[in-house]
Image (tube, helix red, strand yellow):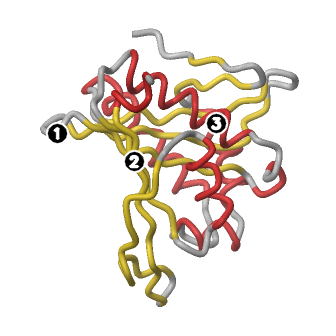
Amino acid sequence: MSLKLKTDRLTLQPFQKEDASRIKDLANNKELATILGLPHPYELEHAEEWIAIQPEQIHEGLEYPLTIVTKNDNQIIGTITLRIDKNNNKGELGYWIGRDFWGNGFATEAVNRMIEFGFNHLDLNKVWASAISRNKASTIVLEKAGLQKEGRLKENRLLHNKYEDVDVYGLLKNEYKS
């Protein structure tokens, strides 16, 4: 499968080894780390190790980690992933955008395209995502993309020595098509 997903402003595509430096620069942000649980500081080795395992994950159909690249200047601005639960025919959506690119609708555009990929190309029954409850921007992205809040898991994640509530969102294929 040639994996290159396009939107009006973005291309979602597999990582290349040379993308590690850009990912390190984007991910090395304390605010992002506190929301996502990324290590801080985020070192080049973190990005290199993560990118190295991705081809096998895609080949096995377990996970589809992709760069989010702007078409106008061919710049990586974030990442988006669909993790596949084959036993239950569903995919968990995960994404982040570099701090300098927040508020431009890029996350919503990428999420919409990845949902379409999950339902129309992978034939998933459900796409779901979770977001730290205090991360209002992420919950807005999920709602704009049509996911519905299914509940809140209280103190579900321990991030940087603090328990965080997590909101869970989902969308079924039959809801997506209508």
Which quadrant of the figure has residue 136? bottom right
Camera-nearest residue between 19 and 170: 170
State which quarter of the image contains the C terminus: top left
In front of the other: label 3 or label 2? 2
Q: Which mark is residue 41?
A: none
Label 3 sits on residue: 19
Task: Point out the tag, 1 or 2, that comes first from the N-terminus.
Answer: 1
Camera-nearest residue between 75 and 173: 173
Q: Name the residue furthest left.
A: 87
Mark 1 to mark 2: distance in Å? 14 Å
Residue that appears at 47% across and 40% down: 81
Image position of 45 (left or right of 126): right
Q: Residues within 10 Å of mark 1 (few under 14, many from 20)?
A: few
Residue that appears at 57% across and 37% down: 111
Image position of 159 (left or right of 62): right
Label 1 sits on residue: 88
Image position of 102 (left or right of 21): right
Percent position (x, y) of residue 33? Answer: 61, 69
Percent position (x, y) of residue 128? Answer: 38, 47
In front of the other: label 1 or label 3? 1
Label 2 sits on residue: 170
**Secondary structure category for the residue under label 2:** strand
**Secondary structure category for the residue under label 1:** loop
Which quadrant of the figure has residue 30? bottom right
State which quarter of the image contains the N terminus: top left
Residue 99 position (above or below residue 136):
above
Mark 3 to mark 2: distance in Å? 30 Å
